[in-house]
């Protein structure tokens, strides 16, 4: 086993293949892209996640647009190799045995990054414990906390069992893995021959940990009642010492007042919560948000913490459609190994760029017509929108004024809209959004054709982000942490029409890389800033007065925007640049 210092990357979900349902959306797809670029760059990284035998879920939409969910089971040994090593965790006093399945991501230079998928489905475990690695984001808080014990504590123990002893950095991709910090504290104390945690242990663990927070939405930050934590983890000897780790002022209080810890019973009856984000914030030497705006928002959410920004990216070779890849191969040699060289795509003749785009668009329109019967045309202007279906992403903003939208289409040129995205099984509001979008087909008729594609995954995402003409994004500011779908579109020459939030604040040059909806404002007072009617009006004006006239009557100018989407945004908003920044800012000594 390779014993040189390594980076351990922990994520609750990792998307490595479209047909392996080990991801739900942006977080898992980003993790997969990060690992691909780590392999391309030769970074000494190993990744840990859970197996998710039943996946996230398979989405089904009935004729009226109501979503139902089914388990998304898959053939594990078709993709993964079982490892002989075993590890275990204690959950409610029971020993839960774990195994790992290995997947390798190989980079452009042949460097391989192993990804270990933890699995509790072993005959030695109780029937309920065997289900703990079945479903991504499934179950109640009790189930979720058990999963996070397996990921964080079990993940560290499994890496040790697999021979990874010289791990110099632990990267927590969101707070789900925060319990790995407690495992590292236990390791440090045990190594020193102690049962209690010392100041030196805390400092040494902080030096090893890196934390990336991904959401300004409060519901995205896991927290669990302390009574449930004690029930699952047990009354550990060091638990009282660690009580203040769960609060916002962890390090200062533990380091300055080690003698002032409360009585053990206070933990059981305090009514307080273990907040995974605060646990990770307090025990990490480097913390970052996933866009400049998001880091600013996070610094206000978590006052007193130093939070840097590393803007997300996407893996260029993965998300560029084949017709575009062939074009780049002819004009920009070595672009896969050097994504920044995509700036030279400005030299590609416009007619060749348009031909490649039409090929990608034809593939998408053919699929839409085959599965939905929408009777769309490859010659008509097509908007794409694919996100998790939830209220703050506002997928129905385009439909705020149906009559105005119909009038724009009839007077300026035909419009087609392709939607996709899953609603979380417990997000009734998200399900209602999908239903309304599907029902809008009747109100719009042939004036504006709409299709909603079910079971959005990596393969469909690749097809949509390369096959539409403009990528639409309408989040409620400042709730978009980063967003990466528009980056995928840019790699394919598809400009964005987006609210100025997340990454688009950095990638937007009006009329050059795409177009804005509304204007840039302060995130303070976000409810007013994201005024729906104001954004809807801006959206309609951009379509009617700028984008549709370019598309239908000034194709040469529209192609200028396509060119710059690739050359300026595709060359920068990629995980190659992103992982280089992590290597320099987060992983380096």
Image (tube, rainbow, N blue to C red):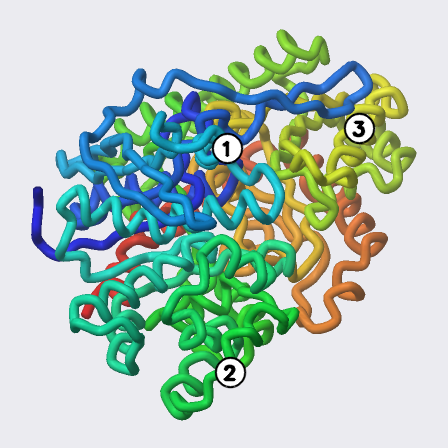
Mark 1 or mark 3, which is nearer the start of the sequence?
A: 1
Q: In which quarter of the view is residue 192 placed?
A: bottom left
Find residue 506 and name its label. Answer: none
Which residue: 28% across, 65% down? 186
Q: Regarding mark 3 in the picture, which secondary structure is present there?
A: helix
Which x, y percent locates residue 138? 58, 37
Residue 85 seen in the current view: yes
What separation in Å lies between label 3 and label 1 (alpha carbons)? 35 Å
Residue nearest the observer in this picture, 362 or 310: 310
Which residue: 44% across, 86% down? 253
Which x, y percent locates residue 536? 80, 48
Say which residue label 1 marks: 128
Residue 357 seen in the current view: no
Say which residue label 3 marks: 435
Tell me: 304 left or right of 386.
left
Find residue 262 and name its label. Answer: 2
**Is residue 305 placed above or below 172 in the rendered structure?**
below
């Amino acid at each position: 086993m390779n014993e040189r210092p390594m980076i351990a990357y922990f994520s609750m979900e990792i998307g490595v293949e479209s047909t392996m349902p080990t991801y739900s959306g942006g977080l898992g797809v980003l993790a997969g892209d990060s690992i691909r670029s780590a392999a391309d760059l030769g970074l000494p990284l190993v990744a840990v996640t859970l197996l998710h035998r039943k996946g996230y879920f398979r989405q089904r939409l009935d004729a009226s647009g109501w979503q139902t969910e089914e388990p998304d089971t898959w053939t594990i040994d078709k993709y993964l190799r079982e490892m002989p090593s075993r590890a275990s965790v204690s959950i409610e006093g029971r020993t839960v045995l774990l195994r790992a399945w290995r997947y390798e991501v190989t980079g452009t230079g042949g460097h391989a990054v192993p990804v270990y998928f933890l699995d509790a489905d072993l005959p030695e475990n109780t029937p309920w414990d065997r289900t703990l690695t079945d479903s991504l984001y499934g179950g109640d808080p009790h189930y979720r906390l058990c999963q996070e014990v397996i990921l964080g504590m079990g993940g560290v123990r499994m890496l040790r069992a697999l021979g990874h002893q010289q791990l110099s950095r632990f990267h927590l991709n969101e707070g789900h893995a925060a319990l790995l910090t407690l495992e590292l504290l236990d390791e440090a104390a045990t190594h020193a021959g102690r049962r209690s945690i010392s100041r030196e242990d805390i400092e040494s663990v902080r030096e090893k940990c890196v934390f990336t927070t991904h959401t300004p939405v409060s519901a995205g930050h896991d927290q669990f009642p302390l009574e449930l934590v004690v029930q699952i983890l047990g009354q550990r000897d060091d638990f009282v010492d660690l009580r203040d780790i769960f609060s916002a002022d962890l390090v200062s209080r533990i380091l300055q007042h080690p003698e002032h810890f409360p009585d053990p019973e206070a933990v059981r009856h305090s009514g307080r919560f273990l907040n995974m984000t605060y646990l990770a914030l307090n025990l990490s030497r480097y913390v970052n948000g996933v866009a400049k705006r998001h880091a600013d928002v996070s610094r206000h959410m978590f006052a007193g913490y130093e939070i840097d920004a590393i803007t997300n990216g996407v893996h260029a070779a993965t998300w560029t459609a084949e017709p575009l890849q062939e074009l780049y191969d002819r004009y920009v040699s070595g672009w896969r190994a050097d994504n920044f060289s995509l700036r030279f795509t400005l030299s590609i003749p416009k007619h060749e760029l348009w031909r490649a785009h039409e090929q990608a668009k034809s593939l998408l329109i053919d699929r839409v017509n085959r599965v939905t019967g929408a009777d769309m045309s490859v010659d008509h202007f097509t908007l794409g929108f694919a996100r998790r279906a939830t209220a703050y992403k506002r997928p129905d903003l385009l439909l705020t004024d149906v009559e105005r939208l119909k009038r724009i289409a009839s007077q300026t040129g035909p419009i087609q809209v392709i939607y996709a995205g899953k609603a979380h099984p417990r997000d009734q509001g998200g399900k209602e959004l999908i239903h309304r979008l599907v029902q809008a087909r009747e109100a719009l008729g042939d004036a504006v054709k709409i299709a909603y594609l079910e079971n959005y995954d990596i393969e469909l995402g690749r097809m949509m982000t390369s096959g539409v003409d403009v990528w639409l994004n309408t989040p409620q500011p400042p709730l978009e942490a980063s967003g990466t779908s528009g980056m995928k579109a840019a790699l394919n020459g598809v400009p964005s029409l987006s609210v100025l939030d997340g990454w688009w604040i950095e990638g937007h040059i009006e009329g050059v890389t795409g177009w804005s909806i509304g204007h840039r404002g302060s995130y303070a007072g976000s409810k007013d800033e994201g005024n729906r009617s104001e954004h809807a009006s801006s959206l309609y004006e951009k379509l009617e007065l700028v984008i549709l006239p370019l598309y239908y009557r000034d194709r040469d100018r529209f192609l200028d925007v396509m060119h710059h989407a690739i050359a300026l945004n595709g060359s920068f908003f990629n995980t190659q640049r992103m992982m280089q920044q992590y290597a320099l800012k987060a992983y380096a000594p």
